[in-house]
Amino acid sequence: MLKKVIIYTLTVIGLVLIVLALGGTKILQFKSMGAAGAAYSPPPEIVTASPVVEQAWEKILTATGSVAAVQGVTVGAEMAGKVEKIAFVAGATVAAGDLLVQLDVSNELAQLRSAEAASDLAKLNLDRAKSLREKDSNSAADLDIANAQAKQAAAAADSLRAIIAKKTIRAPFAGRLGLRLVNLGQILKDGEAITTLQTMDPIYVNFSLPQQRLSAISVGDTVRVASNALADELIAGKITAIAPEVDPATRNVRVQATLGNSAERLRPGMFATVTIVLPEKSTNLIIPATAILYAPYGDSVFVVDEKKNEKSGAMEKVLRQQFIRLGPARGDFVTVETGLKVGETVVTTGAFKLRPGMAVVIDNKLAPDAKLAPKPDNS
């Protein structure tokens, strides 16, 4: 019996010692892991960064406008008649006075020959009456009658010439013609359209600005006009007229700019975006728009500071979150009114995954190329 008690006691003691040994081993392992965790520091995050720079920007105003011809009309028939000749090609350039359409004037020409003969006879009678009057062989009344008859005959001939001229339709000014709207043999009515005629160079762009912008612009200011018909091209011009009145419904003032258009890239009726360049410039702190972390409580950026690592003693780059006030944007850049200084470096990509105090390494190999006038491949 005693032997069994001794064996049991030794077994219990052995089990306790084993448990204590295992527990001690685990405690040592946990302490070692804790020490390693305390000593561990995560590797620096790779970021792209850009310095805060100061640039002088042009002060500009933007507006949407419409292209209009300096001179543009719909050429029509002033008198009714049959189309006898079409002397133009649709879309061609013509000079002032070029023949466009000839209506039938055969009847008027016949009448004109008769009227010219009557006018010639009346002039001869007038000359004879003057000669006889000088010899006192006729009365003053006879001379007056002959003079009036000569004038009436000349007026009748001039009236027929005017009718022939109205039926001979010519270009009122130089420009480019539109599509042909008539055919040979067609009977035209008074005012019926024949084609359009537009002066293409120079050309107007009309646009409107709010009345509070009126004091900022003046005749002679430079404008740049863009249109989706011009691809990436900008056409420069000058403000040539500002309307004296303000629209009471919209409180906008109408403005007109004149542009050179020798290549005829702009056409009347086109939509255009107008940029008015003001004389003065503004100096701004600018950063790429991709650097900004937008939030309801305020916009911020991560500034890269140089700081000494307390454990290793080495200098490293550490992030600091800085709240800023933004100004106007242009292209891929945004101006900063407060919160940053020239020369500070800000993270330009991935700000949403960063946190203050994080160590970083700057690698700009894949940094986005920010531009003031970006030109996307697919726009």
Image: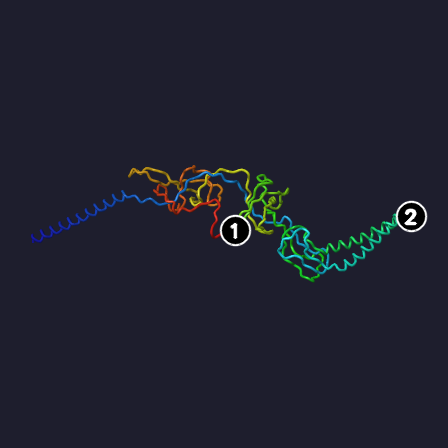
Q: Secondary structure at mark 1?
A: loop
Toward which corner of the image does residue 191 lie, by quadrant?
A: bottom right
| Residue 53 x, y percent position in the rendering | 44, 39
Residue indicated by mark 1: 231
Q: How many marks?
A: 2
Pointer 1 local density, CA inside 10 Å: few below 14, some 14–19, many at least 20: few
Say whether disc 2 or disc 1 marks the residue closer to the N-terminus: 2
| Residue 83 x, y percent position in the rendering | 70, 60
| Residue 181 x, y percent position in the rendering | 65, 59
| Residue 216 x, y percent position in the rendering | 57, 39
**Does residue 290 appear left or right of residue 116 in this picture?**
left
Closer mark to the observer between disc 2 and disc 1: 2
Pointer 2 local density, CA inside 10 Å: few below 14, some 14–19, many at least 20: few
User: What type is the residue that disc 1 sits on?
Assistant: Ala
Q: Secondary structure at mark 2?
A: loop
- Considering depth in this image, is 282 or 259 the residue closer to the camera? 259
- Considering depth in this image, is 308 or 78 the residue closer to the camera? 78
Numbered circle sitting on residue 139? 2
**Does residue 311 appear left or right of residue 117 in this picture?**
left
Q: Is residue 311 above or below residue 97?
A: above
**Does residue 142 appear left or right of residue 243 in this picture?**
right
Q: How far, Cα to Cα, is label 2 from label 1? A: 82 Å
